[in-house]
Structures are given as structure tokens and as C-alpha cells.
Image (cartoon, grey):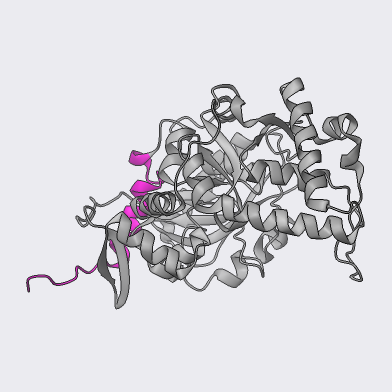
Amino acid sequence: MAGAVRRVGVAERRARLALRHHLAPAARAAGVVEVARDLVGLHATDPASVFLAAAARMRAPEVAAVEHALYEDRLLLRMLGMRRTMFVVPVELAPVVHAACTQAIAVAQRRLTVQLLDQAGVAEDPARWLEEVEAATLEALEARGGATAAELTAAEPRLRQRLLLAEGKRYASMPNVTARVLLQLAADGRIVRGRPRGSWISSQYRWSPIGSWLPGGMAAWSTEAAQAELVRGWLAGFGPGTAADLRWWTGLTAGQVKRALAAAGAAEVDLDGTPGLVLADDLEPPPPAEPWVALLPALDPTVMGWSGREWYLGEHGPTLFDRNGNAGPTVWWDGRIVGGWAQRRDGEVAVRLLEDVGAEGAAAVEAAAGRLQAWLGTVRVTPRFRTPLERELRA
């Protein structure tokens, strides 16, 4: 009947995922910037995940190409974003993420740092002390063009101030204030994490002024406009999904998501009885995708793209996720997760299938594991967040 809500079944959702996430062979991307743009960023808490996620989707996956986009052409930027999680995003998206999510994070982090400084008895006015140290740190960084945390601490001795964290807990610690100051400057959009010390799996970054990546700094967006643009990007890449998916993925409140959905022009669809959302001009079904296989890394943006994961994860969550909801390495066959993988100490990429995928699927998975093993070569990757199956396979 006229005006009926269109049904989008699991098969169509999987076809959209295959094509829009560049996982089907015919949909592979020309480069990492295209991947990061279409997936609204690559999870970057674990540095290796950025490269592995990009490699799984590129026609010609090369570490050097990803590094060049990140550190030479500077088309990508590493930043704190949705859910207070680290992402690598295209530079044109960075101001959107900053205004939609990071500015609120920055306010909360500044409040916490001032509280910790007050507890440490650093100064009568800890907020002013923090601002002065930030200004001195930024001045030292701009004078050098780029520097490590250790180099900045040597240049600004007040960064050695100790803070007591988790007092009374068995994991209590007394780090210096350097990390919190640098995190604050980054969250405020004044500095950016640059090339790491060491290889592509390292997380010890050099820091640079934001102008090195974004001349003129972060472009100004209103919070509401940025949140609408962020939601629009998620719907384009991950839709259909639910409002709950969006609340989880963005970290925004229910009210913020509701306003952003209205501004983005979302339309309702039926996800097998659950109200779903797509962009109003994205109601046509995609062409079918050929069968495909992928070995995706821990914290991959596709695996972490929805909070309602039954349609592609099935009952494998307890085996493939840790207790905090972090995804480990996964094996995909034709639009669903069918197993997990791990790299052993000798470099072997070991796979375990958790369901029957038939002879064709099993052969495709084995071939993909061999390709990944060859691509990794002498590099050894251990996920930052360990999951039950990954630990078992690596043992």
C-alpha cells in the first residue's frame, strides 16, 4: 500500500556492507583515504588495526601507501572522537568529529585534570596553572615543529608534576602530567599525533601543531550541524541501522541523535520487525555482491559499526569480543562473521571457523589467511585487547 515502510532484510544489509565497506572484491578501494571516508574513520586505539583494516579493503594494500597518506600527504589525521575512542579520519572530516564529539570530551577531561591537580596541591589556582603549562608546551612544540612527549617534558619542566591516580586501588599509579596535558591540547584541537617512533605498529607518537595537518586549524562547525553531518555519514556507510546503534557508535545522547537524524533527513525502514533508519535518498536495494572472504583486525570499523550485531555476528560474541565489548580479529564469509584468527609467534596466521561455511568458503578462508601471513611478513601483531579465541589460537 502507498506509504508503507520498506522492509530491509538481512541479505540486503549484508550486500550493502560488502559494497560500502569495500569488502567484496569488486568494491575494493583505490586508497586508504577512500576507505576512511566511507567508513567514517578507522579505529586507531590499536595502531596496527588502522593498517590491517585498510589493507583488507584496498586493491593494492601497502603499508607505505597508508603511511604516506598519514604522514607525508597528511590527508588523514589521528584524533580522539566518537565514544572517546581514537580514530584516523580524513582531514576534511576532522572538524566535524571535533565539533560533534571531541569538544565535549575536552571539557570533561579539563575538569578532571584540574581536579587531579587540585588534589596534588600543585597550585592555588590549578586551572590557571594548567593553562600556563599548556601555553608553554605548545610554544615549545611550535618552536621544534614536532617533538616527542619526552622532548617536550625536557623543554617544559612543569610537565614532570606527578598525579596520583586510582588512590587506594591495587592499580594506583603516579604518572607525570605530560600525558594529560598533551591529551588536552589534542582534544582542544591544538596539536595532533604525528608519525610514531618505530614501525607502523608503534603507539609512541611524535606530536605536531595542528597547523601541520590543518593550516588555519580546525574549521568552525556548530555542534548541531556537526552532529547531523556525522550521523549522515554513518547512515551513508552503515545504514540501515537503529537509533540505538547510532547512540552507541557516536556516544551522543538520545536527544542529540534524534535531532541529528531529523536534520540529516533519515527515513524509516523495517529491519525484520525492528524500526530502522536510512538516508531518505538511499532506499533502493544494492546489486548483489559476489561471495567474499575477509580477515578483519581487532577493533575493525565494520565489526564495531553497530551495537545490534546479531545479523552479522550471530552467537559468536563471547568468543570473539572481550568483556568490555572490544572486538578481536574476525573471519568473515559472505557478509557474516564465521570465525576468528590470530598471528602466532612464528608468524603463522591461524584460523578457527566457528560454523560450517562449506568447501568453497573454507578454501577461501585458508587462502586469505595465507595472503595475510605473507603480507605481514616478519611483523608480529598482538591485539591491544585480547579475546578468548585470539588467546587460544596464539598459545
Q: In the image as oriented, which residue stretches furthest toward the left?
A: 1
Identify the residue shown where x is 76% and y is 31%: 197
Of 307 and 184, which appears nearest the observer?
Answer: 184
- Looking at the picture, does residue 31 appear above or below residue 158? above
- Residue 13 in percent (x, y) is at 32, 60
Q: How many marks?
A: 0
- Looking at the picture, does residue 176 appear above or below residue 391? above
Q: Dividing the image into 4 quarters, which one contains the C terminus?
A: bottom right
Q: Dividing the image into 4 quarters, which one contains the N terminus?
A: bottom left
- The answer to whether 152 appears left or right of 189 in the picture is right
Of 154 and 243, which appears nearest the observer?
Answer: 154
Residue 145 belongs to magenta span = no
Residue 351 in sight in this render: no
Identify the residue shown where x is 74% and y is 32%: 138
Residue 25 belongs to magenta span = yes
Asked which quadrant contains residue 275, the reply is bottom left
Of 55 and 234, which appears nearest the observer?
Answer: 234
Q: In the image as oriented, which residue stretches furthest toward the bottom?
A: 273
For the record, the magenta segment spans 1-27
- Residue 19 in percent (x, y) is at 34, 47
- Residue 272 in percent (x, y) is at 29, 75
Identify the residue shown where x is 53% and y is 33%: 76
Asked which quadrant contains residue 376, the reply is top right
- The answer to whether 57 appears left or right of 115 in the picture is left
- The answer to whether 356 appears left or right of 167 in the picture is left
Identify the residue shown where x is 67% and y is 63%: 387
- Residue 277 in percent (x, y) is at 31, 64
- Looking at the picture, does residue 5 appear above or below residue 31? below
Residue 223 in sight in this render: yes
